Image (tube, rainbow, N blue to C red):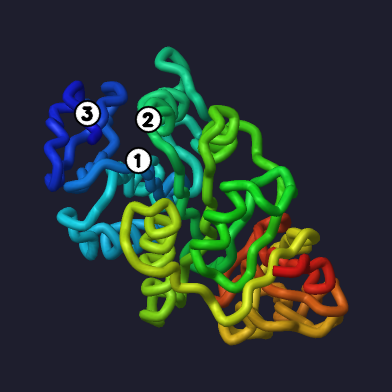
Amino acid sequence: MSTFRHLGLEGAPGARGMTRLPVSDVAGGYSLSVPLHVLNGAHPGPTLMVVGVVHGEEIFAIDAIRTALASVDLARLHGTVIAVPVANPPALAANTRNNPLDMLDLNRQFPGSEEGWLSQRIAAAIAPLVDRSDCLLHIDGGAIERVIHYVFVKSDGSGNSVTERLSRAFGLKLLYRGSHSTGSVTSYAAGRGIPAVLAEIGGSTLYTDPRYLQRASTGVLNVMRALHMLDGVVAEPAEQLLLTRRTLLRVPVGGIFHPAVGLEAIDGEVKGGTVLGTVMDPYSLEQVGEIRAPYARSALLQMRVLPSAVQPGDYAFIIADLDSAEPA
């Protein structure tokens, strides 16, 4: 049983509660805080922390967390769920990746500092929750013009780590194994010896297809089942591939981006050399750039799906090499 009495939550078995973690007063004349939801199961068990909107434009995580938590029967829950659906309130309000009040990326500030920049203070308010957890699940996501759909496995590559097992349990078809980003919430958890799952899912037109919200909320419940917090079998995909090679393709030149492939390309195979998108000069009306699939057997992990104004260097696609897949 988890208490959280210092937060005003008694943590009685079978109870839900919500509070706000105080961060700091800001120049706008209000006190900034971070929302915290606590679900205490009727039975003892581990503590799972779920966090979303570390980047302000990744709002898909909010509905994924809301839907998953609403379906949890506390009478059957073993352990405690602590959820921070909005880790970065200033960035959410501005619909920006970084905190607009200090221009920092919150996911590079952990464990933070109570005397640092505002983003560092937010990280410092959240980090103690990570310390209290037996597993961290970070739901990252896409933005208005971009969708993303894979699990980023942050493990040592042994193939049998708890992190890799729980990452597979989330239930998406494609996984990519890579290193941590310094200062990220998952790297902080790993440094504390806490398994961390990073689900990259959501954004843009995924909102119009209920299957993707279902996958995200089911992923949260799958991780809970894998931790033996819920009864039932983990819902596994028909096929699951762990990839070990990928590349980030950026917009080559500013202009108007037009996608050449649609959402149907997610989770599928794209032949090398396929045109994925083009850039048009809005003044000359001529095509000035294009992006092609780099691998003979390419898999789109992230993609731009809407026409949009772009700057050189903007994110365009994250593409993995299907020939780098390890056996499941």
Indicate whether 40 appears above or below 316: above
What amino acid does circle 2 point to?
Arg
Kindly identify the residue that appears in the image at 45 percent across and 43 percent down.
136
**In the shown orientation, is residue 5 left or right of residue 120?**
left
**Residue 47: mark:** 1
Kindly identify the residue that appears in the image at 47 percent across and 67 percent down.
203
Indicate whether 9 appears above or below 290: above
What amino acid does circle 1 point to?
Thr
Q: Distance between the residues labelled 3 and 1?
A: 12 Å
The mark lying in front, picked from 3 and 1, is 1
Q: How many numbered tags mark residues here?
A: 3
Q: How far apart are marks 1 and 2 (CA)?
A: 7 Å
Q: Do the residues labelled 1 and 2 touch (CB within 8 Å)?
A: yes
Q: How far apart are marks 3 and 2 (CA)?
A: 10 Å
Mark 1 / mark 2, whichever is N-terminal: 1
Kindly identify the residue that appears in the image at 67 percent across and 46 percent down.
155
Out of 257 and 60, give the one closest to the viewer: 60
Q: How crowded is mark 3: few (under 14 residues within 10 Å), some or many (20 or more)?
A: few
The residue at which mark 3 appears reads as 4
Out of 202 and 242, give the one closest to the viewer: 242
Percent x, y of residue 94:
38, 48
Mark 3 / mark 1, whichever is N-terminal: 3
Percent x, y of residue 14:
13, 47
Percent x, y of residue 158:
74, 48
The residue at which mark 2 appears reads as 132
Secondary structure at numbered mark 2: loop
**In the shown orientation, is residue 292 left or right of residue 22?**
right
